Image (spheres, helix red, strand yellow):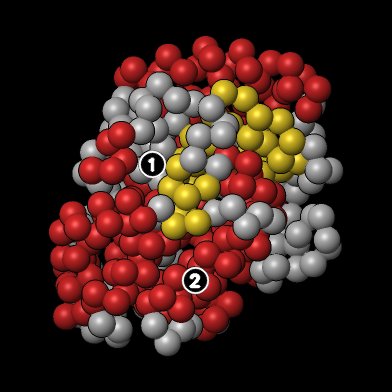
Amino acid sequence: MTTDFRDLSERLPGWVEAYRAYAAEGGVATYIPELAHAPQRALGITLHHRSGTTVSAGDADLPFTLQSISKVFTLLLALMDRGERAVFEKVGMEPTGDVFNSMLKLELVQPGKPFNPLINAGAIVVSSLLLGDSPEEKSQRILRFVRELAGDDGPAFNEDVYRSEAETANRNRSLAYFLKDNKVLDEDVEPTLDVYFRQCAIEVTCAQVARMGLVLANDGVDPATGRELVPRRFVRIAKSFMVTCGMYNASGEFAIQVGIPAKSGVSGGILALVPGELGIGLIGPALNDKGNSIAGVHLLKLLSERYDWSLF
């Protein structure tokens, strides 16, 4: 599984322009009002190879917020802070088949803990497990971790998106209070949600996300320095969740059609990786009915078929 970067560099701009047309079949997220301003037809991608070679095409420089992509990195940070046992006492390891903000199984399945860390309920619990004496300290630790993995001080909080999400997050507040009532969430609700909203509002580019993906593709080792940034065991856990739960309730379909670890966000961003080879950052704000970038998923399917990326 070795990508021909010369072929990729030559063909990628044309593919991006052709696949941009799929955006007309979707729509940008509007339930967070600030995200509704995103350009629907935008599509951009950066691929970062372990050799240091990068290739970008389309609107790769368009900034976007991590949204649910951040859940991968708060999970890693929580595992590093608390260890596996403490984290998985509070969240499960199974896909749900439900939409990402559902509370259905919290009520139906005992003991009422979230099925996995990549749905909203699970990510809220994971955010509560991070070390720090205040929401501000926890949020700054997440931001420093993202910057370290990106090899770039550029990622920063988008205050407009943060406020927009915090002011309209009635479903997430309901989830958090339900978890608190179930004694799954030990911390206070509002400070925990503040951390969660801020992690979702970290603004990045495709190149920064691709670099973060490359560290995961390299089992947690920074390919530029050889330094281990995340223990390999925890990276393997995160990649497993990305395959089984990373694309919301379309994760099974994505595994069959694309077959690589990935995590999407409702900003239209996708973090993906080819293990041992490369990291991918993608932005396409128009979403399909599952909440994933519609043009982005089609583009990744093409690339995976062309370069034989699938793990399966």
> Residue at 49% across / 71% down in the picture?
140
Classify the position of the N terminus by image quarter: top right
The reply, left or right, for residue 143 in relation to residue 303 is: left
> Residue at 72% across / 23% down in the picture?
8
* Position of 3 relative to 75 (above/below): above
Spot occupied by residue 216 in the image (x, y as percentages of width and height): 66, 56
**First in sequence: mark 2 vs mark 1:** 2
Element assignment for label 2: helix
In the drawing, what numbered circle is on residue 94?
none
How far apart are the alpha carbons under marks 2 and 1? 21 Å
Q: Is residue 88 visible?
A: no
Q: Nearer the viewer, mark 2 or mark 1?
A: 2
- Total numbered labels: 2
> Residue at 27% across / 57% down in the picture?
163
Residue type marked 1: Ser
* Position of 103 relative to 4 (above/below): below
Q: Residues within 10 Å of mark 2 (few under 14, many from 20)?
A: some
> Residue at 67% across / 68% down in the picture?
230
Q: Closest to the observer: 249 or 28?
A: 28
Residue at numbered disc 1:
267
* Position of 277 relative to 294 (above/below): below
Q: Is residue 113 visible?
A: yes
Spot occupied by residue 224 in the image (x, y as percentages of width and height): 82, 55
Residue at numbered disc 2:
140
The reply, left or right, for residue 228 in relation to residue 45 is: right
